[in-house]
Image (spheres, grey):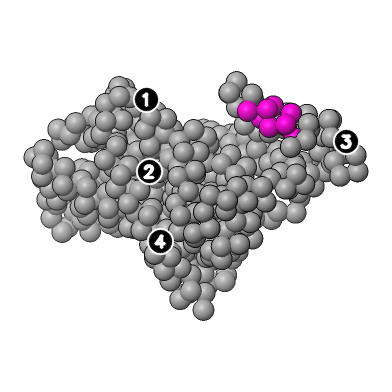
Amino acid sequence: MNLPLIIFLIAFIITFLLRIPIGFGMLMSSIFYFVFAGGPAAPVSMMATQFLSQMNVKFVLIAVPLFIFAAKIMNTGEITDMIFRFANTLVGRWKGGMGHVNVVASLIFSGMTGSAIADASGLGLMEIEAMRKHGYDDGFSCAITAASATIGPVFPPSIPMVFYALLSGSSVGALFLGGMVPGVLLAVALMVYVAFIAKKRNYPVGERYPIRVFMIQSFKALPALFTPIILLGGIYTGIVTPTEAGALAGAWALLIGIFVYRAIGWKKMMVVFIDTAKATGVVSIIVAASFSFSYIVSIEHIPQMFSSLLLSITENKYMLLLIVNILFLILGMFMDVMTVTLVFIPMVLPLINLLGIDLVHFGVVVVLNMMIGLSTPPLGGLLFIVSGLSKTPLHVVIKESLPMTTVMIGVLFLITYVPELVLFLPRIIGS
């Protein structure tokens, strides 16, 4: 390792430990590298070139603010209420009904936002309060809310999958299709666990609604439920690109929010626009900084060094997948998903290509892995969100979340070592 690279790595670690925003941390460490390296391969001017020029040629990135906008709209007013009520009439009558409602509502919501944070922040408090009202333990209510929120970026649409497609060259549409079965598997596994705990702790059976009420709630929720159908149908019929589908989803969310549910007035709309602009600004800085960061990683051959290191441990494909899974699970506990995606995935892609692992399969596996990290004790970000929303002590949430993490890891290993669970839909629909 040469001096500029050592300074680059130390600077990045220090900015991370000082909790400097990750975008600025990557920029600062990259600046240090270019200043100390110099030369034709790394002139200081290359910093600006990588920071600005790459942003102009990545058309798929336009989808990100559009999906953020759609998520903000869906999180406003009556739309989340409609989703929750529909899920309640669908599965609320079962033993442990509110726990099942929590999972089903998150699965439906995931088809609209593609964000675990949006799920936990939007539906989260509503789900926790409903479970409290029906006599569920606070820790369990918070833990299942955090766990079900992980479905968001696995089931399409998915913002992390858009970034993975950018880095790997994979098809966004294929990644979205590949996430459908794992997303449903994750929901089913969590519902089985809810049923087990409900029986063990004698949680109540939910209210049984007459068919008329179910039909009314279904009709009211129908415009919101059409969002993933419009989005995914547009992509897979070839009518729109994934980027254009983001615009379509945002426009549809805005239309139903204003004209169908009448949940968005002028003031709320302005708040949504401002919040979307802020979030897009943060994302843009991180993405632009990552291009400079990735350029340094590339010219210093760090991916090749990382691959050689892992191959020196074992050349067994399945053991290497296990090591990579453990690595990304730990990273997901400590770091933002976008940061892990943009910084660390380029380091492992050469190894994945060398092993002949399908990039769509690996993309879905790694996204699910990072989502599990978000709800894994003791530092998973979703645990802090639900604890803060509900005012439940963090240690109570952590105690309840450990078995759920085990269940989710079981699903992760299933899709890791049975690739067809991810790939058969992209192959059928793509053929």
Identify which residue is drawn at 51% across, 54% down: 314
SS of the residue under disc 4: helix
The answer for how far apart the CA atoms under marks 1 and 4 are is 36 Å
Residue 419 higher or lower than 64, as above or below: below
Amino acid type at image mark 4 = Tyr
Residue drawn at (83%, 30%) of the image: 36
The x and y percentages for residue 5 are 75, 35
User: Quadrant location of residue 183?
Assistant: bottom left
Distance in Å between CA atoms under marks 2 and 3: 45 Å
What's the distance in space between the residues labelled 1 and 3, CA to CA?
A: 47 Å
Q: Quadrant of residue 402?
A: top left
Tell me what residue is drawn at x 57 percent, y 70 percent: 239
Which amino acid type is marked by label 2? Answer: Ala
Question: In the structure shown, which secondary structural element does the residue marked by tag 1 occupy?
Answer: helix
Q: Nearer the viewer, residue 281 or 137?
A: 137
The mark found on residue 149 in the picture is 2
Mark 4 closeness class: few <14, some 14–19, many ≥20 residues within 10 Å? few
